[in-house]
């Protein structure tokens, strides 16, 4: 059962309900929250002794805050959230809230394996300043994560969340795609505002846009590698790891797509594909953090069991950026 304190917080949040106004969002009796735009998924910096380095986190945020992002995703996959304690996850979100520009949106990853734990984490994320919760699919028992199970999970979380909920499908990490039929059903919930889809299947993304078109529901691409294609099929933005190092370029790609400059957008997209693959599928978070060090941010070490890149991998990573003119 949920504790009395959590239930009290839920009631207080729901009393404010969807009428809460944050940073100019359209809420209340009109449309749902507008999450359109580009978001870097913020990394969690660690010291040499594997403690969270909050000073470096704030330094990175101040630098990232100079770009025209819609906001920041905190405690997503690139934030190494599975390796953090619950208290660390909340403290990171709290510090980001304090350091980030006030006009930006803070989407906080609150997903846990159980529905109860996810509800409690979502309420806690709201208490420390999150504007919306981005909730990854539970996956440990993925063989039993049917559409019905996932619809039940997300409905319960959205019912009890004092902030809007964004669905999060990342099959590369979870081995589980949030089924299209489940997304369509969940898009009708008044407190579920969209999905971050990191699978890279543009046909699926177009289908999600099409099948939820009668709902107030938005689709975000989960990577810069297919951002142009995602805009072409109706997505409204992206959560892009590459934006942590090439923020201006990812935002430029967004502008070119939104203004219909497709030829220039195509040229830029082509130059982003290899660097994006390098900091996602090929070398992952260690690759992203190494690249951040090169571009004037603090990347630093990952928390174990993730390991730093080998010299060979580091050279290959550098080549993916330099061959496209970024280093």
Image (spheres, helix red, strand yellow):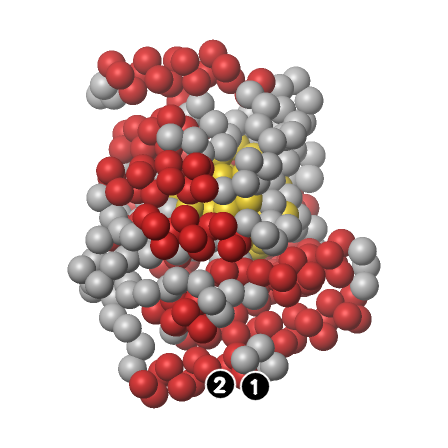
Residue at the image position 43 percent from the left and 37 percent from the top: 98
Pointer 2 residue: 319
Rate crowding at label 2 as few (under 14), some (14 to 19) or many (20 or more) other CA atoms within 10 Å: some
197 displayed left or right of 28: left
Percent from the top left, x then y, of residue 57?
38, 51
Percent from the top left, x then y, of residue 286?
34, 69
282 displayed left or right of 263: left
User: Does the rendering let one see residue 156?
Assistant: no
Numbered marks: total: 2
Residue at the extreme left: 49
Q: Which mark is residue 267?
A: none
Percent from the top left, x then y, of residue 244?
50, 60
What is the quadrant of the N terminus in the image? top left
- Tell me, yes or no, whether the two marked residues, 2 and 1, touch with CB atoms within 8 Å: yes
Q: Is residue 225 above or below residue 257?
A: below
Q: Which mark is residue 323?
A: 1
Residue at the image position 23 percent from the left and 19 percent from the top: 3
Disc 2, SS:
helix
Percent from the top left, x then y, of residue 133?
44, 36
Cα–Cα span, label 2 and label 1: 6 Å
User: Does the rendering let one see residue 126?
Assistant: yes
Viewer-proximal residue among 155 and 55: 55
Disc 1, SS:
loop
Residue at the image position 24 percent from the left and 39 percent from the top: 86
């Amino acid at each position: 059962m949920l504790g009395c304190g959590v239930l009290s917080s839920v009631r207080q949040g729901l009393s404010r309900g969807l009428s809460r106004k944050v940073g100019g969002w359209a809420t209340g009796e009109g449309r749902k929250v507008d999450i359109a735009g580009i978001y870097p998924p913020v990394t969690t910096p660690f010291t040499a002794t594997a403690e969270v380095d909050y000073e470096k986190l704030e330094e990175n945020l101040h630098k990232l805050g100079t770009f025209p992002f819609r906001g920041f995703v905190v405690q997503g996959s690139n934030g190494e959230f599975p390796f953090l304690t619950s208290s660390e996850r909340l403290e990171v979100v709290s510090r980001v809230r304090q350091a980030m520009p006030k006009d930006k949106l803070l989407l906080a990853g609150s997903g846990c394996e159980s529905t109860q734990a996810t509800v409690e984490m979502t309420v806690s994320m709201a208490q420390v300043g999150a504007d919306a919760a981005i909730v990854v699919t539970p996956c440990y028992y993925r063989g039993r994560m049917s559409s019905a199970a996932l619809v039940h999970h997300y409905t319960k979380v959205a019912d009890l969340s004092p902030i809007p909920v964004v669905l999060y499908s990342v099959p590369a990490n979870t081995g589980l795609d949030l089924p299209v039929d489940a997304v369509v059903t969940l898009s009708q919930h008044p407190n579920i505002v969209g999905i971050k889809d990191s699978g890279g299947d543009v046909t699926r993304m177009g289908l999600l846009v099409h099948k939820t078109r009668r709902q107030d529901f938005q689709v975000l691409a989960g990577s810069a590698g297919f951002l142009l294609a995602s805009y072409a099929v109706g997505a409204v933005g992206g959560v892009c790891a590459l934006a942590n190092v090439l923020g201006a370029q990812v935002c430029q790609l967004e502008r070119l797509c939104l203004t219909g400059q497709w030829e220039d957008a195509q040229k830029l997209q082509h130059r982003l594909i290899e660097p994006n693959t390098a900091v996602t599928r090929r070398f992952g978070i260690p690759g992203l953090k190494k690249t951040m060090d090169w571009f004037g941010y603090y990347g630093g070490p990952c928390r174990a069991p993730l390991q730093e890149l080998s010299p060979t991998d580091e050279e290959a990573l550098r080549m993916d950026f330099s061959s496209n003119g970024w280093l």
